[in-house]
Structures are given as structure tokens and as C-alpha cells.
Amino acid sequence: QSALTQPRSVSGSPGQSVTISCTGTNSDVGGYNYVSWYQQLPGKAPKLMIYDVSKRPSGVPDRFSGSKSGNTASLTISGLQAEDEADYYCCSYPGSYPVIFGGGTKLTVL
Amino acid sequence: EVQLEESGGGLVQPGGSLRLSCAASGFIFSNYAMYWVRQAPGKGLEHVSAISLNGGSTYYANSVKGRFTISRDNSKNTLYLQMGSLRPEDMAVYYCARDSHNSGPYPPDYWGQGTLVTVSS
């Protein structure tokens, strides 16, 4: 299985919205509603931001939202803040091991 | 509160061995499949290994198959990764992570803080 495809980088100004895409196949992203998104700050462990495509864990701001269309999942961050600057990874249930991660996207807040 | 705490990382020579541990708390450990995920310096996330609820089923990435062994002790709420024949390309931060839907292979929800494995002579 190949890694999910994410843009290497995205950027936005404070207050704007940005969307990060995550493209897989109908055997992973497109086949199941089990896509998660993680935020990774420098030197820190990944933190779950979205699970099951669009659900937010307790404590995650509602500025973070997830969606899916076909084989592509998306993470949208609205009202961008400086502390959102981080690496973001998507992950999908693949039907069988291994769990598949995206290559990661570096978000820069201008 | 769910907590995962890895230990056992360090500097090891090529060909050497290391045993990582992950102490779990705040949830019923025996109810969840568990993973080891690694991240090489400046790179992305790689799912290295997984183990089922009772330890009866395991998964290994091709890159570590035959060299690494995952295990768990549900009485001690602890996950292990025995690493052998270590190579420079195994150098990474190793994270312990919990399957989000109990039985795998769902994306993980909780992660430990990671433990760094350095393979160098």
C-alpha cells in the first residue's frame, strides 16, 4: 500500500481559512469513513484533531473540520491562528494492516 | 486520562539490540489493539508494528520483519518492542499508539511522547 498523498506545504494569513487535502484510493480513504488528522508541533508527538472523517475530539477547537469526497479527505482550518503552524498528517483505515499515513503537510501562518 | 509513556530508547551500534516499553494507563489496556509508529528525522510517520488485544495476532512492516518483535503484558498494562539487528535506517523516534476503535487497523487516537532510537557506531 502506498502512502496517502498530501501537499508538502500550505500557507495562510491569520484569520484566513486553509484546506489540506489527503488523496488515497477506493481501498482506503474512499472505501471507509475512518480518516483521522493529526497535528504535530516541532519536537512533539502527533495529536489527534479529527477522527472518523469529521468528528472532533473533546478539546479541539471547532475551527478544525474534516470532510471527504470520493478518494480525497480534507482538513479545513478556519480563523487561522499563529499557534496552528505545525505539520499535519492524515491517516486512513486500509481494511488490513498497515495503517496508512499521508506524507505530511507543513502549515505556515504568514 | 489516557496516558502512554515510552522508555528504552538510546544509542546502539549497528547490529545491536534494544527493547522499548510503553506503559499505559487511564483505559482498559486489554480492550485495545496497540501500535508502534516511528518517525525518522525530518520524515513522516511509518506504522512499524501492531498487536491484537490478547497478543495472538501481530503485524510487522516489511522493513522490520524478522528483526523486531512486538508483545504485550496485559497484567502490567505494558507494550513492548524488541528490536534486533538494528540498522542506521532504523534510527527514529518510536511512538506507542492506541488503536482508536479497539481491534485495528483503525487510525490511532492516543500517542505517547516518543522515545529516540539512535543507531550509530
Image: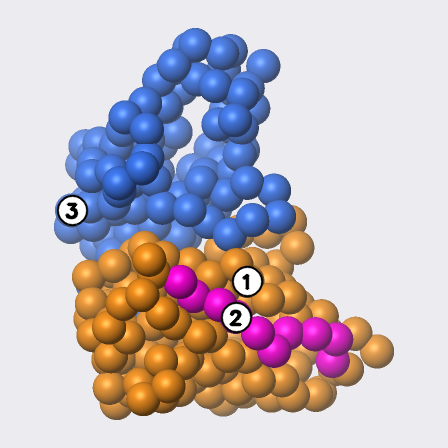
Chain colours: A blue, B orange
Depth check, front residue: B67 or B70: B70
Residue B10, numbered label = none
Residue A88 pos. (x, y %) = 45, 38
- Residue A18 showing in the rendered view: yes
Residue B99 pos. (x, y %) = 28, 64
Task: Identify the main secondary structure in magenta.
Answer: strand
Label 3: which secondary element = loop
Q: Which residue is mark 3?
A: A33
**Mark 1 vs mark 3: in front:** 1
Q: Which residue is mark 2?
A: B6
Q: Which residue is mark 1?
A: B114
Which amino acid, mark 1?
Answer: Gly
- Residue A2 showing in the rendered view: no
Q: Residue at x 46, y 82 (%)?
A: B80
* Callout 2: chain: B
Q: Residue at x 57, y 74 (%)?
A: B7
Which comes sooner in the sequence, label 1 or label 2? Answer: 2
Are the residues tagged 1 and 3 within 8 Å (C-beta)?
no
Which amino acid, mark 2?
Answer: Glu
Are the residues tagged 2 and 3 within 8 Å (C-beta)?
no
Depth check, front residue: A97 or B118: B118
Which range is magenta? B3-12
Q: Quadrant of residue B56?
A: bottom left
Residue A95 pos. (x, y %) = 20, 63
